[in-house]
Amino acid sequence: MLRRFRRSDATGLSTLVDRHFPEENRLLGMRPIEFKKIVERSFRLDLRILIALVRLVKGPIFDLFVVEVDGRIAATAFLVYLRSAGYIGMVMVDDPFRRRGYAAEVVRACIDHAGRSGRAYAMLDVLANNDPALRLYQKLGFHEIQRGRYYSLGLAHRVAPAPTPEEGEPIRPFERRDARELVRIAAAELPPEVAAVTPVEASDFTSAPFAARAFLSETEAWVVGPPGRPRGFVRATVAPAMEAANLTHPILDPTLPDELGSRLIEQALAWASAKGAPSIVTELKGSVPKAEAALRTAGFVPELELLTLVRSTTG
Ligand SMILES: CC(C)(COP(=O)(O)OP(=O)(O)OC[C@H]1O[C@@H](n2cnc3c(N)ncnc32)[C@H](O)[C@@H]1OP(=O)(O)O)[C@@H](O)C(=O)NCCC(=O)NCCS
């Protein structure tokens, strides 16, 4: 039976996530008990009301579907409603239930809901070495639009870079008025097909207070350059469900000197280190040599390869 997730599914879900995503969990340092607490927390009255209010104003935010067989969770999939696409994640089927069509069923439900909510595309990320999943998605009509990679770095003893000299461009906290220029810089990196599916928006740079509240996360963003005219951006986040901190894909204008890009990243690393994160992980997508070089200079090492797959929600 396909149905929406319930609070009582939280234990089953965290056990499945712990078991079925070993490579990602190793990299991110997933904490199953904290993850379960956060899932349960999302059912608290205040958060339900908040979710309902956001839904009223902005439409659906996310859905979590499960397939239940004989009282057990056999399959799950998570759907996030982005502006033009439904983003599908957490597709997993517990071992005894595999090859019975449950993954296909739950992914089709996500595609269907994304389409009914007016999204033209369904998209997802999959590890490049995950053959069963790649076959599943190929069978369901998905095709690759982009390759990406996780990068990670141990964070012991990171210190903030020395303050920028008076005459130099400052590294400073992100302000809302920086978003418009950052959209321009980030959009210039995107191939047209990717831009059609996930256009860059100002909200990509502001942090959603809703998400921070739901995941109990702490986050900070920095830019380099004068107010309203930034040339680089990074955001770091720490959350109790993961040991590793997260660094967003660094947005670096081609005109930004490499040294300033490195200092910007160092600022984020020092913050995450001060928050007690033992490591930090980021995900680069597409061809972004400047960001990749800046990460390597900071000491990041390439990890798992990812493919972004897309299909239309119609036909
Ligand atoms: C990938 C996964 C979700 C597939 O679940 P499933 O319920 O077994 O998949 P389905 O029964 O719906 O399979 C549909 C089609 O996918 C393909 N497929 C699924 N598993 C496959 C496998 N192990 N080998 C080859 N093809 C496979 C087949 O084409 C299959 O159709 P068929 O059985 O008629 O040949 C499951 O193996 C899993 O949970 N893996 C661990 C978590 C994971 O990697 N999730 C994907 C994250 S992106």
Image: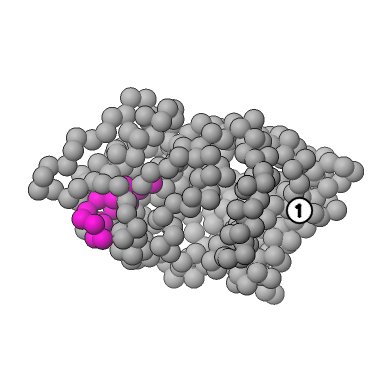
Question: Could you say where residue 43 lies in the image, as x and y percent from the top left?
Answer: 68, 45
Q: Is mark 1 within 8 Å of ligand 1?
A: no
Question: Could you say where residue 26 lies in the image, as x and y percent from the top left?
Answer: 56, 32
Nearer to me, 76 or 59: 59
Q: Is residue 274 magenta?
A: no
Question: Could you say where residue 251 lies in the image, as x and y percent from the top left?
Answer: 34, 54
> How has the structure been colored for display?
one colour
State which quadrant residue 302 falls in: top left
- Left or right: residue 258 versus residue 270 is left
Q: Amino acid at mark 1?
A: Arg
Q: Is residue 231 magenta?
A: yes
Most extreme residue toward the top is 157
Residue at image x 54%, y 54%? 307
Residue at image x 63%, y 72%? 118
- Left or right: residue 81 versus residue 148 is right
- Left or right: residue 168 versus residue 239 is left
Nearer to me, 230 or 139: 230
- Give the residue at mark 1: 4
Q: What's the magenta region?
A: 222-235
Residue at image x 73%, y 62%? 108
Residue at image x 42%, y 42%? 219
Most extreme residue toward the right is 70
Asked if residue 261 can be seen in this view, the reply is: no
SS assignment at label 1: strand
Nearer to me, 32 or 307: 32
Quarter holding the C terminus is: bottom right
Asked if residue 202 can be seen in this view, the reply is: yes
- Left or right: residue 160 versus residue 90 is left
State which quadrant residue 157 falls in: top left
